[in-house]
Amino acid sequence: MKPSRGKFRPLPEDKPETILIVDDEPSIRETLRLLLKQSGYNLVEAGSGEEALESLQEYSVSVCVCDFKMASLSGLDVLSHVVSTYPEIPVLMLTGFVDVDTAVTVMKRGAFDYLKKPLKKEELLIAVQKALVHRKMLERQRQLEEENVTYRGNLERMVEDRTVQLEIKTRELERVNAELRKANMDSVKALAEAIEAKDAYTEGHCKRVSIYARGIARHLSFSKDDLEVLEYATFLHDIGKIGIAEALLNKPGPLTPEEYNAVKEHPLIGARIVRGIEFLRDTLDVILFHHERFDGKGYPQGLRGEEIPITARIAAVADAYDAMRRERPYRKARTLQQALETLRSEQSTQFDPKIVDLFITHNVYRMGNES
């Protein structure tokens, strides 16, 4: 039976935020209490999933920190209840282990972030602070939505003297949206520059990949909003490399199997970075899956064919082409003809054949000033 949706409860402005700690191990609860109490938060503790549901009804919870694995009602059960009943409450999941499947499952089920045990104070406090900022953004959004509903409800009887005000508000909203889009794009470009700063051989790579990807997508009837998401996503497809050692990224030779496995972690690292950024949530498909292969031999999940999101298949072609055309420490750049021939030879193995055909047939590669 689906629980009834709880009333949106805003954070009190004059009181410390309340953190709900959910864990069936008293020692873990004690550790969390000590770490969080020092920062001035109010704390509510629950020793089981059932107690957590009762506490959510009784207290105005700001953030929920919940263990992944508990007896009876599991952490995922608590997460599902919070997402469906109290969607304004961010949930931080605690896990004793992290693999790709667990991380993807937790993120897809709606967790704001996840933390690995044993906990580090700095990581916990930063994650809680990010969750609170996100919560306040949701409150502001809800407030604006409620104001808009009220305004529209009164509009019919006030239409004549409110028409001018509506036009002013519309122009202001358009201006704010334009400024927000610019600010978002500036943030994305700054992150892309941070990626490229770690790899001296990839200057301009993120921008070119984004140009190629948009060129392909225009032939697939992408909407304006979908194109914007794709642009953000391809600019940030390699953001996880921020968490990879520069020595590996700039190694003047082939990587060892161990080094390659370390580099292969960057999609998951990247997904974790953008997971808590509201306007970047739709970029996860590209960041997580742009190294999947059409034949199912890619990573991190070994998706095959159309199991791979279309945006990730587009990014894979754009990314591979630009990488082939640029010199690396361990190889020379390929010529235009060599790069195109490689794309053709890898159709249906590494790449979606339809995407490769669009890229070559419509001369999308020329958009990056290729000749």
Image (spheres, rainbow, N blue to C red):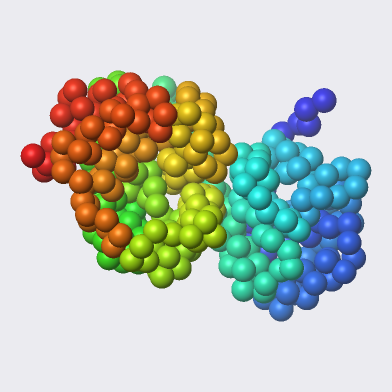
Task: Tell me residue 338's x, y (percent).
Answer: 20, 38
Task: Tell me residue 129's x, y (percent).
Answer: 59, 65
Q: Nearer the viewer, residue 67 or 353?
A: 353
Above or below, comparing residue 76 to residue 194 in the picture: above
Task: Tell me residue 110's x, y (percent).
Answer: 63, 42
Image point 67% across, 74% down: which residue? 121
Image point 62% across, 68% down: which residue? 123
Quarter containing the N terminus? top right
Quarter containing the C terminus? top left
Residue 152: image quadrant is top left
Q: Is residue 298 visible?
A: yes
In the image: residue 122, left or right of residue 150: right
In the image: residue 100, left or right of residue 174: right
Residue 291: image quadrant is top left
Above or below, comparing residue 169 to residue 135 in the picture: above
In the image: residue 285, left or right of residue 118: left
Query: From this viewpoint, which residue is outermost toward the bottom?
Result: 38
Above or below, comparing residue 88 to residue 364 in the picture: below
Q: Is residue 13 visible?
A: no
In the image: residue 1, left or right of residue 140: right
Query: From this viewpoint, which residue is outermost toward the left?
Result: 371
Residue 339: image quadrant is top left
Q: Nearer the viewer, residue 76 or 249?
A: 249
Image point 66% across, 50% down: which residue? 99
Above or below, comparing residue 207 to residue 15 in the picture: above
Q: Nearer the viewer, residue 351 or 135?
A: 351
